[in-house]
Image (cartoon, rainbow, N blue to C red):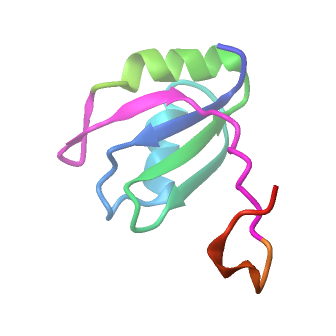
Amino acid sequence: MQGSKLYVGNLSYSVTSDQLEELFGAYGSVKQVTVIEGKGFGFVEMSSPAEAEKAKAALDATDFKGRTLKVDEARPPRERERRGGGGGGGYRRF
């Protein structure tokens, strides 16, 4: 694993950042936790790639709050297509 940030999917909507921090803290030092409210996923950043790999191996496909977790290395965000404002009638400019 190259990075120390993990994607955590299939979360119950009631899961809090504190609960994820406690869960992942058993596998190393947690630097940051972000839960995307109403979406069922979040991100956990561990102190090192080794700790992230250990947490991923231990927690992927395990039950947490009645849901089977999906834990994987987080990918960088995709660039969004920029859309020009106004005019153009919905056609793309090349």
Residue 81 is inside the magenta segment: yes
Query: Residue extending furthest left?
Result: 66
Residue 89 is inside the magenta segment: no
| Image quarter hosting the N terminus | top right
Where residue 23 appears, as percent x and y from the top left, is 43, 39
Q: In which quarter of the image is residue 38?
A: bottom left
Q: Which of 55 and 94 is in front in this view?
A: 94
Q: Residue at x 77, y 86 (%)?
A: 86
Where residue 29 appears, as percent x and y from the top left, is 65, 32
User: Left or right: where does residue 60 sit relative to residue 46?
Assistant: left
Q: Which of 52 and 84 is in front in this view?
A: 84
- Establish if 66 lies above or below 4: below
| Image quarter hosting the C terminus | bottom right
Query: Residue extending furthest bottom?
Result: 86
Q: Which residue is drawn at 32% across and 64% down?
A: 14
Q: Which of 37 and 48 is in front in this view?
A: 37
Q: Quadrant of residue 16?
A: bottom left
For the stretch drawn in magenta, the main secondary structure is loop
- Establish if 63 lies above or below 34: above
Q: In which quarter of the image is residue 93?
A: bottom right
User: Left or right: where does residue 67 sit relative to residue 24?
Assistant: left
Where residue 92 appears, as percent x and y from the top left, is 71, 63
Q: Residue at x 72, y 56 (%)?
A: 81
Q: Nearer the viewer, residue 93 or 23?
A: 93
- Residue stretch in magenta: 62-83
Where residue 2 appears, as percent x and y from the top left, is 72, 16
